[in-house]
Amino acid sequence: MTRARKALIDLSSTSYYHLIARCVRRAFLCGEDKYTGKNFDHRRTWLVERVKLLSSVFAIEIAAYAIMSNHYHLVVKVNRQQALSWSDNEVISRWYKLYKGSPIIDKQRNGGTLSDAEQLLVLELIEKWRARLYDISWFMKNLNEFIAKEANKEDNCTGKYWEGRYKSQALLDETALLSCMAYVDLNPIRADMANNIEDSDFTSIQERIKHLQKIKEKAKNTNQDNDAAYQIKQPKSLKRFGKREHENTIPFSLIDYLELVDWTGRHVHPKKKGFIPKNVPDILISLKIEEATWLDRVQNYGTHYGNFAGSKTVLRSHAAKNDVSWYKGVG
């Protein structure tokens, strides 16, 4: 059953969401179309660049992404408190980076004198824009409309480009966040498009690894401590990993996460050969998740959960909060 968007995005329950959008056409969103022989890999760059631009304007941070041949995945965090802390001028400045704005705001910015009624209207507009700048629906609308227009222009056609409205999934606890991020980062490996996470093109984990390699090389050349250097310098366009005591970070060590995803990828790759370490990753031990449970969760993530992901206890609690008797994933 389709749920109203306002019932799916509940910032009082969680600030983390998994978002998916799928192309409606036989022609691929990106990649190579076997029917026409055309290659659309450059559209992956469009998506990554647009996502990062929007994240720099909206109070919405990117935790993970994967750009596939006919769909894409994002894991985002809505930073509502950041948006509420912006000054009125910053809200206006951010809004004008993406939209035309308003004549009355232009009048104010140009030093014009405003009547009392106009001043009230300005304040109303600013608060409306502020709310939209931490609204996932506005974020996704801008992203999908931009890509659709560019693709239609390139294909010299008009019409619907996306399958429908984007799909969202609330990530209600740390385990849900961790397993969803791993699921997203491992998409190319599960699809047999890559053999390892380093070669998983247009994914957040590949971006993190490449950045780590650059920092380690720089630290090596300057005799710095590798781990210390990287903890300071993670990719600016992605939400940082840290620890629970570090404010506003993903509450896990980056190195532990990379090891976990690599270990998981060696199990889920359909043709993977070679050594699989016997030691269970530290994150699973700290979260008290059994190896088999974790692998089942990641391999079957797409079918295990619906619009909400989390432990059975959390899912039951959230369902009760929304006067719903059952959520997919409770069992």
Image (cartoon, grey):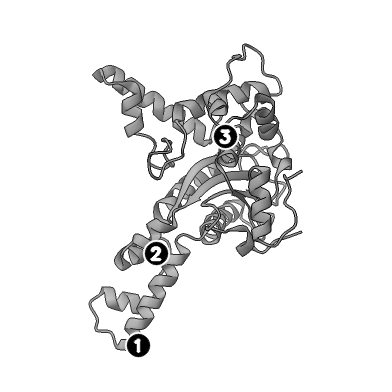
Which sits in the foreground, 171 or 289?
289
- Residue 266 picture location, percent across and down: 63, 21
Q: What residue is disc 3 on?
A: 185
Q: Is residue 24 left or right of residue 9?
A: right
- Quadrant containing the N terminus is bottom right
Q: Quadrant of residue 299?
A: top right
| Residue shown at the point (62%, 15%) measured from the top left | 276
Indicate left or right for 257 with 186 as reference. left
Whether residue 162 is visible to the viewer of this picture, yes or no, is no
Q: Is residue 321 left or right of residue 108?
A: right
SS label for mark 2: helix
Query: Is the residue 88 above or below the residue 157 in the image?
Result: below
Per the model, the C-alpha gap separating discs 2 and 1 is 22 Å
Q: Secondary structure at mark 1?
A: helix
Q: Which tag, 2 or 1, sits closer to the chain's start?
A: 2
How far apart are the two marked residues, 3 and 1, measured between alpha carbons?
A: 51 Å
Question: Which of the two labelled residues, at mark 3 and mark 1, occupies the earlier sequence position?
Answer: 1
Q: Are marks 3 and 1 in contact (CB under 8 Å)?
A: no
Neighbourhood count class around disc 3 (C-alpha, 10 Å): few under 14, some 14–19, many 20 upward: many
Residue indicated by mark 2: 95
Three-letter code, disc 1: Ala
Q: What's the residue type where badge 3 is placed?
A: Asp
Query: In the rendered image, which residue does mark 1 sit on?
Result: 117
145 vs 104: above or below: above
Distance between the alpha carbons at the discs numbered 2 and 3? 31 Å
Find residue 85 and report its horizontal and vertical position in percent. Answer: 34, 60
Compared to residue 58, the image places residue 281 above or below, namely: above
Residue 214 x %, y %: 36, 25
